[in-house]
């Protein structure tokens, strides 16, 4: 039995400790906003925040989040849109949208560590894959989110 | 013109159309654990209250517009709804949008015409029809008001979802009139607006799906959740053309949550109560394959075979003039061989389908570019009448052509039928990459005979390429030429006295299909690289040379001139940075692109800036149009830089994004898009035409920077280091 917090709620799940957090979230808790893209920790579609750190949930066993706090896209901005989500809307970032939950979570983590990222910081900090090529708009959105956070 | 967003989804799961986009309203926290598809069982029988098949108006005056094309990122939910709303005269900020029902289309005489999404055709092929549908709905609403008030319809005006009779001051909302309007038959369909009267079309409206996509609320096929649903992982035969020999389910049947193993078309699936458990059990289950006749096929052999195929047998792919004469005269000849590999689509959402088979009915939840084909496929796999199949289309996590043929759906229906419950079947990324239907491998031999001034007397373009038609089993192509093979070659815009296109359609065991921009993806690389080579051979500027050969094409010249201006052609660049140009027409749209590319001493390539100029005639939504060009550039850039599917011992060597890399943020150039609209009757496509020019533009820029000519893709295979 693994016990941890997801989006502010206590969760206790009886699953194998080696089950990736991704599949626990999607198939057991029904939090399907977090996406399966590669299953290999490469694409970042499954990015969630664990104690504030961006983690690839397809590579994070449930056993490793025991006692920790997980934030998924459903929990981000549940009360009010996060500045990253607002900036994403302003910048018209998403196209197909499939990678965007992970992209938004990665950007939230990036800005938490670095409130004023340069283009180079964004290049090195944003390694999630987008097949629609929304990178230029996401880059603009991250700069915009940095501005919005100061308002 | 702005649209106010609410955090509630605009897209609803309509109780009146089970084919409606299965999107619940924004679901905080654990609400997502509830069923997300508004109507899992589906019920297309209840239709209405609708003014016509595209326009539903509730008594509370809320308006729902139906879109009969699939949203895979290209923005059709927004742009096609704009076309309807343009004529309907309603407040676009208040409309809801849902998918039209493919079942309805089947039983109701193609009321939505073709629901297939592809060929950059959604606007091109349905704009007039949708304008007509919107105008017809508006006129019926007006007629209903006029009849109610005993006045002439011509004395009434529709605006903002209200019909007014100015003379008497009476007015009625669309909601009050809809029920009456639905019963009205117009004596004649109204004329549709011409572009100078557009008030929505042509303006950059925000996409209606963006809020859903930044909050995790957008539902893709892979997000389907049904009561009693099981999960299936599938192993496809690792060599195309092989088959399943045996498997030993007993080795994994005792694992937690594992329910069954089911042989399926082209492989075997393991079913469990959770996808991870299914996937892990599948990986541990012994499977034996009959690898079939292609078990020793190899990409090195393919490359030699495609080169050899350029020597024949060759079919006539079109042209004009006497090429023999052009090449016979004492002229300068230039020849170059270009080669491109197989390419995977690699949609971000791996292929998946959820099926619920019952003896008399099959329901399907997925993202498909071809809902009608999905109905036929599920009917066949499930042994039911097509009219008993309900395809609940979702958002597509990328399409690019791959979701036009839904191999995964057949398997999902087979598994659901075998286990007697709803099943979500997902291909892992490795299965998705290794069991794709690929962009064909090709070799192209380009020949030109140049006159003294460098102008071409004749072109001879020869292509050896896989037949998509044959690979899909859609025909034998008995004359040896298919459109996909010659698009971009036979319609080469550059003036020459003679042009001959020769074709050898040659397939291997590797299945091929439509991949964003199809034949133009390789043919533009060959033509636009070759034109650059000719300019160099003639000691002429690549832009000026193209200009001189396009004198009969003012449409191309307008794009080229804009490109020269916006793209800073001829302006100084730092050392090691080159500027390259390409221009190509596909899907009715001309796109010119200039790439600025830095080549580092070690040979590392960075595309720093791309300027695109586009003539698609008219625009529906400049915002989504520009996004499509950006997307098409990056899709083509990934292919140009890295994209390559290779075969060893019959198997695809690549499997995940480590071996089939995708351009990332750090690889993304600045992209500037400019529209050079010629207007008139031209309404060109936008999803694909931005892709073909980028590979040759980058290759030509590398030549400008280094003097090294890229003649095969991906360019990572050409050493560029000093």
Image: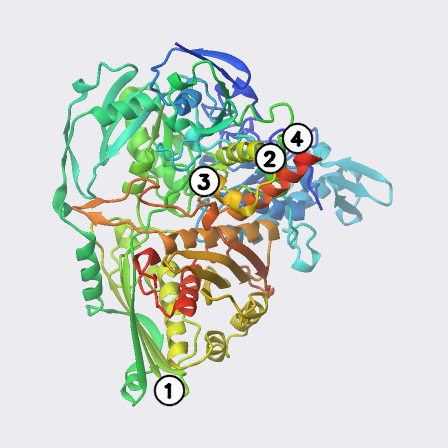
Q: Nearer the viewer, mark 2 or mark 1?
A: 2
- In this view, B548 is above or below B263: below
Q: Furthest-right residue in view?
A: B168
At 57% from the left and 45% from the top, the residue drawn is A118
Asked if badge 4 and badge 3 are on a common chain, one would say: no
Q: Residues within 10 Å of mark 1 (few under 14, many from 20)?
A: some
Q: Which residue is mark 4?
A: B58
Find numbered disc 1 in the image and state the secondary structure of the residue it sits on. loop
Q: Which dot marks residue A127? A: 3
Chain under label 2?
A
Q: Quadrant of residue B90?
A: top right
Q: Quadrant of residue B564?
A: bottom right
> Residue B96: x, y in percent?
62, 35
Q: Quadrant of residue B75?
A: top right
Q: Which residue is mark 2?
A: A84
Q: Nearer the viewer, residue B545 or B47?
A: B545
Q: Residues within 10 Å of mark 2 (few under 14, many from 20)?
A: many
Q: Nearer the viewer, mark 4 or mark 2?
A: 2
> Residue A35: x, y in percent?
44, 31
> Residue B300: x, y in percent?
19, 56
Q: Nearer the viewer, mark 4 or mark 3?
A: 3
Kindly indicate whether the residue at mark 1 contacts the one at mark 4 (C-beta within 8 angstroms): no
Question: Quick check: can you spot residue B49?
Answer: yes
Q: Nearer the viewer, residue A135 or B601?
A: B601
Left or right, B282 with reference to B688 = left
Chain under label 3?
A
């Amino acid at each position: 039995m693994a016990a941890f917090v997801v989006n502010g709620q206590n969760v206790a799940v009886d699953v194998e400790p080696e089950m990736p957090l991704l599949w626990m979230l999607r198939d057991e808790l029904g939090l399907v906003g977090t996406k399966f893209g590669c299953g290999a920790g490469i694409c970042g579609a499954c990015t969630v925040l664990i104690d504030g750190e961006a983690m690839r949930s397809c590579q994070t066993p449930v056993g490793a989040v025991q006692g920790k706090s997980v934030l998924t896209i459903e929990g981000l901005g549940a009360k009010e849109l996060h500045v990253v989500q607002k900036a994403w809307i302003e910048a018209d970032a998403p196209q197909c949208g499939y990678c965007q939950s992970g992209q938004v979570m990665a950007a939230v983590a990036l800005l938490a560590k670095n409130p004023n990222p340069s283009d180079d910081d964004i290049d090195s900090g944003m390694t999630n894959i987008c097949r629609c090529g929304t990178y230029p708009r996401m880059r603009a959105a991250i700069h915009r989110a940095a501005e919005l956070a100061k308002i | 013109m702005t649209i106010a967003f609410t955090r509630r989804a605009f897209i609803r799961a309509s109780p009146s159309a089970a084919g409606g986009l299965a999107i619940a309203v924004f679901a905080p926290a654990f609400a997502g654990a509830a069923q997300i598809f508004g109507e899992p069982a589906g019920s297309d029988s209840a239709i209405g209250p609708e003014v016509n098949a595209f326009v539903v108006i509730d008594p509370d005056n809320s308006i729902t517009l139906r879109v009969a094309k699939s949203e895979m990122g290209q923005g059709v939910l927004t742009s096609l709804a704009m076309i309807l709303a343009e004529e309907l005269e309603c407040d676009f900020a208040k409309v809801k949008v849902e998918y039209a029902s493919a079942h309805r289309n089947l039983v109701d005489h193609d009321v939505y015409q073709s629901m297939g999404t592809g060929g950059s055709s959604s606007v091109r092929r349905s704009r007039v029809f949708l304008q007509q549908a919107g105008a017809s709905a508006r006129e019926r609403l007006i007629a209903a008001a006029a009849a109610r008030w005993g006045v002439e319809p011509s004395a009434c005006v529709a605006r903002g979802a209200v019909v007014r009779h100015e003379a008497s001051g009476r007015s009625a909302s669309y909601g009050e009139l809809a029920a009456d309007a639905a019963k009205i038959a117009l004596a004649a369909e109204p004329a549709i607006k011409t572009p100078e009267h557009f008030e929505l079309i042509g303006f950059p409206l925000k996409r209606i799906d963006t809020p859903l996509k930044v909050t995790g609320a957008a539902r893709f096929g892979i997000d389907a959740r049904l009561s009693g649903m099981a999960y299936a992982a599938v192993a496809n035969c690792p060599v195309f053309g092989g088959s399943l020999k045996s498997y030993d389910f007993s080795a994994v049947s005792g694992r937690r949550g594992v329910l069954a193993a089911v042989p399926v078309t082209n492989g075997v699936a393991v079913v469990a109560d959770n996808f991870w458990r299914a996937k892990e059990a599948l990986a541990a289950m012994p499977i034996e394959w009959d690898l079939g006749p292609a078990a020793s096929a190899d990409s090195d052999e393919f490359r030699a075979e495609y080169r050899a195929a350029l020597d024949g047998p060759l079919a006539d792919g079109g042209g004009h003039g006497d090429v023999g004469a052009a090449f016979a005269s004492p002229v300068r000849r230039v020849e170059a061989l270009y080669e491109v590999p197989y390419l995977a689509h690699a949609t971000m959402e791996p292929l998946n389908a959820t099926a619920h088979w019952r003896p008399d009915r099959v329901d399907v939840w997925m993202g498909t570019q071809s809902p009608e084909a999905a109905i036929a496929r599920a009917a066949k796999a499930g042994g039911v009448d097509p009219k008993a199949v309900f395809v609940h289309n979702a958002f597509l996590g990328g399409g690019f052509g791959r979701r036009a043929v839904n191999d995964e759906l057949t398997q999902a229906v087979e598994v659901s039928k075998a286990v007697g419950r709803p099943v979500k079947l997902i291909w892992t990324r490795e299965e998705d990459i290794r069991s794709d239907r690929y962009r064909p491998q090709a070799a192209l031999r380009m020949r030109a005979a140049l006159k003294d001034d460098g102008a071409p007397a004749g072109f001879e373009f020869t292509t050896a390429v896989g037949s998509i038609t044959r690979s899909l089993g859609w025909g034998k192509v008995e004359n040896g030429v298919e459109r996909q093979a010659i698009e971009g070659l036979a319609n080469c815009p550059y003036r020459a006295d003679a042009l001959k296109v020769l074709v050898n359609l040659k397939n291997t065991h590797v299945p091929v299909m439509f991949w964003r921009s199809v034949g133009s993806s390789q043919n533009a690389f060959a033509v636009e690289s070759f034109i650059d080579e000719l300019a160099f051979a003639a000691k002429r500027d690549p832009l000026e040379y193209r200009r001189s050969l396009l004198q009969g094409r003012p449409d191309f010249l307008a794009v080229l001139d804009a490109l020269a201006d916006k793209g800073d052609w001829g302006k100084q660049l730092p050392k090691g940075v080159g500027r390259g140009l390409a221009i190509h027409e596909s899907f009715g749209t001309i796109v010119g692109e200039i790439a600025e590319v830095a080549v580092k001493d070690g040979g590392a390539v960075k595309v720093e800036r791309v300027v695109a100029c586009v003539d698609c005639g008219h625009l529906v939504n400049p915002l989504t149009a520009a996004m499509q060009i950006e997307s098409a550039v990056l899709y083509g850039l990934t292919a140009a830089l890295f994209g390559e599917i290779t075969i060893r011992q019959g198997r695809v060597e690549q499997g995940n994004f480590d071996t089939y890399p995708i351009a990332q943020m750090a690889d993304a150039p600045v992209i500037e898009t400019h529209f050079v609209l010629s207007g008139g009757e031209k309404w060109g496509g936008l999803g694909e035409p931005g892709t073909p020019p980028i590979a040759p533009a980058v290759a030509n820029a590398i030549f400008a920077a280094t003097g090294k000519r890229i003649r095969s893709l991906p360019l990572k295979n050409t050493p560029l280091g000093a």
